[in-house]
Image: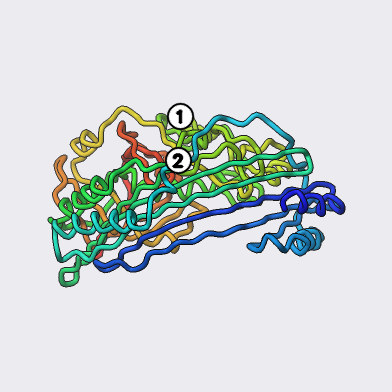
Amino acid sequence: MIERALELAGKRARGAEVTLVTSRSRQAEYEDDRLKHVQVSQSTRLGVRVILDGKLGSAHTTDPEQIEDVVGRAIQLAEFGSDAKFEFPGPAELPTVETYDPAVEKIAKEDLVAAGAEMLDLVKAYNDEIKVFGGASWYAEDRRLVNSAGLDISDRVSSYGIGTGGVLVRGTDMLFVYRNRDWRTPVMPPADLAEKTVEDFRLAERTASLKSKAMPVIFTPRGNYLLLWALLMGLNGKNVLKGDSPLAGRLGEKLASEGFSLVDDATINYAPASSRSDGEGVPRRKTSMIHDGRLECFLYDLETAGKAGTATTGSGPGCDPTNIIIPPGEVSLADMIASTKNGLLIEHVMGLGQSNLMNGDFSVNVSLGYKIEKGEIVGRVKDAMLTGNAYDALKRIEAVGSEPEWAHFFCTPPIKIDGLSVVAKG
């Protein structure tokens, strides 16, 4: 099948690439204290990219029998495609990265249902008024990529995820808490994750009033995404090439306080976004984007690297990040809190979609945050907003924490920013 598609594309195009992906998944989802559904699915996807007359064309299908059709569409779309100032890569040595655990696919539907039920019961045992949601799931994928330059790569990946949280409504006060963990192998027992969720609810039992002003803000590993999403948009080579990124033309400049570094690393065994090669067959690598506050590199795929006159970072297609790492500092979260006279600890925010993240600007609601007073957490804040600019905040980093944690595909420690604007609505 895949050889036939490459043969057909090679008859017309200067270069061709064919990707065949087959996937399997199982999921048990809970909502409002009950099992919502159990889902089993599988799919096959065939993708073709061609370089024809200096243009890039691509097409995809979920029906692998339609080989002639998908190849024909890729060739037709090349007429309207973007300039292809690159060649498909040939064979290269790939890093050794563990991405598949066969134990994941042996997890039965009943086991996923039981994992979700265990987490639900533990959260309800703490407070029966909480409306609990969450569940457990796994995903596995076989992927083969071949191209006209002689590349032929086959890989298998797995992923296992659990998550639980809930909503507690008391009058006009609505508390939302959620935790999850995704990894390419089962590493966290459901009971451990549920206990962390219960701890979040327990810490949020007390509330505290807040006054509008600029104050120190500590972001937990789960709260750091407010700063990182804006930064990653700016580091995307496609945005840089189009001139949309505020970081364009600023390589070598100081963007953040010393002690802050940012790394993209797809070579960590079993990490959520790890792989041996990117979607174009380029070997994955560890890429330092920011080192001690200084901008060192953008993320590029083959297409954008060719247009920018540089080399791909193995981030294709799309210039997307993989596992994002902030190396830890030397200050514990406890010490960060103890050294804060009057400030805010951020776990979750809402409203990123209404912010101008490309420029780094944000104005978000604090969905889960805690007031710090005289070095202690005194209660959860309600009806508060956080406003500012992510790039300005990076320049005011007071401390990088010593305790990194994984949250989605980020592995980051707590970060303390000196002087962000907090607006209290009450």
Which one is in front, 115 or 414?
Answer: 115
The kind of residue on which mark 2 rests is: Asp
Is there a contact, CB below 8 Å, between mark 1 and mark 2?
no
Position of 161 with respect to 297 (left or right) is left
Q: Is residue 155 above or below residue 110?
A: above
User: Which residue occupies 35% across, 62% down?
Assistant: 29
User: Circle 1 sits in a helix, a strand or a loop, which is it?
Assistant: loop
User: Which residue occupies 36% across, 31% down?
Assistant: 328
Q: Is residue 402 above or below residue 417?
A: above
Residue at numbered disc 1: 292
Residue 414 rendering spot, x and y as whole percentages = 32, 39
Visible in this render: residue 304? yes
Q: Which mark is residue 63?
A: none
The kind of residue on which mark 1 rests is: Asp
Residue 20 rendering spot, x and y as whole percentages = 65, 51
User: Which residue occupies 76% across, 58% down?
Assistant: 81
Task: Rate crowding at label 1 as few (under 14), some (14 to 19) or many (20 or more) other CA atoms within 10 Å.
Answer: some
Position of 14 with respect to 127 (left or right) is right
Q: Which colour scheme appears in the figure? A: rainbow
Distance from the alpha carbon under mark 1 to that under mark 2: 36 Å
Which one is in front, 274 or 102?
Answer: 102
User: Which residue occupies 48% across, 58% down?
Assistant: 356
Residue 42 rendering spot, x and y as whole percentages = 53, 59
Q: Quadrant of the C terminus?
A: bottom left
Residue 349 rendering spot, x and y as whole percentages = 33, 56
Q: Which mark is residue 101?
A: 2
Upstream in the sequence, badge 1 or badge 2?
2
